[in-house]
Image (cartoon, grey):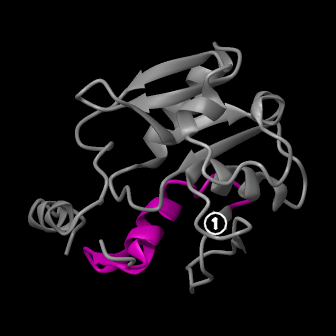
Amino acid sequence: MGGVDKGSIEVGGRTLLEHVLAALTHVADVVVVGDEVRTNRPVTFTREDPPGGGPAAALLAGLRAFPHAPGRVVVLAGDMPRVTEDTVDRLEAAVEDHADGAVLVDRGGRAQYLCASYRVAALLAAAPPYGQEHGLPMHRLLAPLRLAEVAAVGDEAVDVDTWADLRAVREGDDFGT
């Protein structure tokens, strides 16, 4: 999308980031990897170093920014406005039954590694040494992990990767505005 800060794009009167944060209301400590913006709830902002290192580098940077090391971490892409608390609850429940984590799987059968819950110890065990995560593909970081798959309900796996995606989300807007 030409380098646009997708988290700041508005859909249904709220930014994409605020839609995602609404799915995390029951999560005490939230870390957002990206440029600092105003939010409706307290969050910690951080960046991968160097910026632009990709999703795996961002995930690992986010883990380092927690004030207290969590046992598990919920990972949500900032461009998934239809993710809900129910999505997060289903992912968390699936981790209870599985060793390393759970990922949402879209209607096409693709694992959405950025809509997941992971055991932090498993992520850290799979992580390369600090400074070597830049450009690391998510699938390579997660390859050693045993992951449960959670089927998406409705359109909760929809993300906004293109301007056409944004138009489709806005046209199907059911956010009450």
Q: Can you give x and y, in whole percent of width and height, for residue 128 in the image?
A: 79, 39
Q: Residue at x 29, y 24 (%)?
A: 109
Q: Secondary structure at mark 1?
A: strand
Task: Identify the image quadrant of the C terminus.
Answer: bottom left
Check residue 11 for magenta coloring.
yes
Residue 12: quarter of image? bottom left
Q: How many marks?
A: 1
Would you place residue 81 above or below residue 145 in this image?
below
Give the left or right position of residue 132, taking residue 140 as reference.
right
Give the answer, above or below, for where 102 lies relative to 166: above
Residue 44's spot in the image, x, y percent? 73, 71
Residue placed at 57% from the left, 85% from the top? 37
Residue 130 left/right relative to 24: right
Q: In the rendering, at what x and y percent does residue 38 appear?
A: 57, 86
Q: Residues within 10 Å of mark 1 (few under 14, many from 20)?
A: many
Kind of residue indicated by mark 1: Val
Picture coordinates of residue 108 (x, y %)?
A: 23, 28
Given residues 136 and 172, the one toward you in this image is: 136
User: Which residue is rendered at x = 59% and y = 47% of the image?
Assistant: 75
Q: Residue at x 14, y 64 (%)?
A: 164
Apparent side of residue 59 relative to residue 3 in the rendered image (left or right): right
The residue lying furthest to the bottom in this view is 38
Residue 7: name its quadrant: bottom left
Most distant residue in the left direction: 171
Give left or right: position of 47 versus 169. right
In the figure, residue 94 lies in which quadrant? top right
Q: Which residues are magenta?
A: 4-30
Query: Badge 1 is on which residue?
Result: 32
